[in-house]
């Protein structure tokens, strides 16, 4: 993950974005509502401006009586109070302003100002300057009732302050649902499938691709399901193989017990069959232990040459090979970090497998090179080798390739690979100049 607690940042950003969006929506919508409910319509503004233009045209005739008649006609047609005043707030007509009328000139509004009823439910007074000579006079009139904007109604207030925030909160809830509940529902369905023994269903890839805690949970869940699938597959394969492999020596034991073999031959036959069954059970238990328990093996510096010398002693006794056919090109400075017993068991399995598949005059050698902080070991035999397509398959448990020789059960290489992997190493096979090459890569010990 690029950020720690990325899901927290997503939710925090979503909430911050929601709050900013809510503030912007309420502000912009309130401004729009205010302009549409408290300001004069452009047509009404043009109408009132035309009255001021007419007043200026009559005033330019220099006939106060004509101006007074025009004012009274406008006042009667609009059913409101109208006055034409000069620069000193004096009446330009023949009728002077009373004290009450002069008080109306205290709080006048322009056409582009918001309009609402004043105190005591009084209509506002509008001041409109002459268009050509604004410094010479203006038209003042109380806004007619029919032109007064409706203002903010209870329904408009309900919509702007309740409906819009509720819709935005609903959108935020959908966002949270998509970010949290949907992937959790997928995980719940996957858990129910596992509970119903359905190990083949997988989690939606969109959840496992997420770069947050839920994505990590989905990947961990799928890893757990994969481990369960592998464990169940290995258990079934182990049971099938054990049942098959044990039936054969048991059948031979029954035949030998019912035969008329001398006692000494019968005892040797029984001992050989029991040893084979014991080895099969031991190898199967070792593989199951590596696969299911995945123990944390303690690592220590191990001298590879010393382990090889101990292993070839037993190998020479069992196979009859001389030491000259089991050379080691490593020196005592080849020291790796490994678990001594597990490393020795893995190397012994590789050595036994190489001897088993080598010709009578073959050579099995161990070499290695230092690669930075690691040692790369190579166990080379002179056997028939393995086809390129089967280099990975030979590490599968109980696998026996067609045409292979020997009495093995197909567990030695599997146990060796699991043991090396538990020591933070890798084991792989490759084709050599002659025969099969087993490559081991382990961390070098600083000695």
Image (tube, helix red, strand yellow):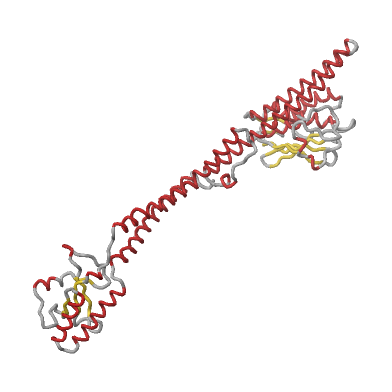
Q: Position of residue 178 (x, y in %)?
A: 50, 47
Q: Residue at x 73, y 38 (%)?
A: 376
Q: Position of residue 11 (x, y in %)?
A: 45, 47
In which quarter of the view is residue 45 placed? bottom left
Q: Position of residue 41 (x, y in %)?
A: 30, 71
In which quarter of the view is residue 381 placed? top right
- In the displayed structure, would residue 395 be above or below residue 124? above
Quadrant where the N terminus sits is top right
Left or right: where 74 falls relative to 31: left
- In the displayed structure, would residue 196 be above or below residue 207? above
Q: Nearer the viewer, residue 220 or 89?
A: 89
Residue at the limit of the structure toward the left, as seen here? 99
Number of numbered discs overlaid on the protein picture: 0
Left or right: where 320 falls relative to 40: right
- In the displayed structure, would residue 141 be above or below residue 193? below
Left or right: where 437 falls relative to 140: right
Q: Nearer the viewer, residue 84 or 343?
A: 84
Q: Residue at x 12, y 79 (%)?
A: 90
Q: Position of residue 73 (x, y in %)?
A: 18, 80
Quadrant where the C terminus sits is top right
Q: Residue at x 21, y 73 (%)?
A: 126
- In the displayed structure, would residue 385 be above or below residue 237? below
In which quarter of the view is residue 316 placed? top right
């Amino acid at each position: 993950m690029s950020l720690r607690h990325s899901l927290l940042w997503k939710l925090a950003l979503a909430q911050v974005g929601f709050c900013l969006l809510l503030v912007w929506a309420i502000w912009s919508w309130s401004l729009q509502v205010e302009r549409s409910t408290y300001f004069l319509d452009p047509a009404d503004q043009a109408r009132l401006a035309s009255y001021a233009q007419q007043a200026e045209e009559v005033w330019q005739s220099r006939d106060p009586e004509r101006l007074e008649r025009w004012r009274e006609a406008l006042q009667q047609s609009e059913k409101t109070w109208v006055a034409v005043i000069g620069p000193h707030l004096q009446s330009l007509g023949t009728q002077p302003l009373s004290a009450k009328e002069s008080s109306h000139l205290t709080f006048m509004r322009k056409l582009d100002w918001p309009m609402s009823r004043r105190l005591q439910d009084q209509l506002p007074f509008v001041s409109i300057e002459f268009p050509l000579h604004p410094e010479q006079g203006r038209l003042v009139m109380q806004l007619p009732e029919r032109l007064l904007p409706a203002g903010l109604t209870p329904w408009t207030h309900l919509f702007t302050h309740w409906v819009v925030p509720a819709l935005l909160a609903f959108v935020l809830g959908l966002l949270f649902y998509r970010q949290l509940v949907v992937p959790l529902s997928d995980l719940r369905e996957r858990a129910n499938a596992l509970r119903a023994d359905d190990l083949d269903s997988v989690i939606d890839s969109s959840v496992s691709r997420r770069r947050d805690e839920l994505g990590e949970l989905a990947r961990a869940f799928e890893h757990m399901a994969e481990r369960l699938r592998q464990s169940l597959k290995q258990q079934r394969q182990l049971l099938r193989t054990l049942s098959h492999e044990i039936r054969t020596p048991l059948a031979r034991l029954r035949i030998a017990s019912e035969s008329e073999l001398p006692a000494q031959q019968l005892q040797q036959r029984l001992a050989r069959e029991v040893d084979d069954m014991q080895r099969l059970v031991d190898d199967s238990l070792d593989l199951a232990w590596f696969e299911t328990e995945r123990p944390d093996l303690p690592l220590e510096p191990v001298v590879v040459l010393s382990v090889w010398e101990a292993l070839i002693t037993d190998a020479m006794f069992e196979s009859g090979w001389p030491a000259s056919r089991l050379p080691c090109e490593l020196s005592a400075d080849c020291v790796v970090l490994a678990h001594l017993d597990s490393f020795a068991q893995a190397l012994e399995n590789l050595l036994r497998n190489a001897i088993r598949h080598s010709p009578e005059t073959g050579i099995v050698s161990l070499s290695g090179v230092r690669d930075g902080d690691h040692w790369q070991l190579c166990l080379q035999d002179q056997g028939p080798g393995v086809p390129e397509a089967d280099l990975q398959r030979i590490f599968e448990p109980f696998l026996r390739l067609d045409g292979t020789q020997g009495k093995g059960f197909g567990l030695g290489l599997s146990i060796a690979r699991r043991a090396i992997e538990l020591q933070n190493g890798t084991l792989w096979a490759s084709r050599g100049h002659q025969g099969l090459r087993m490559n081991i890569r382990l961390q070098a010990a600083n000695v």
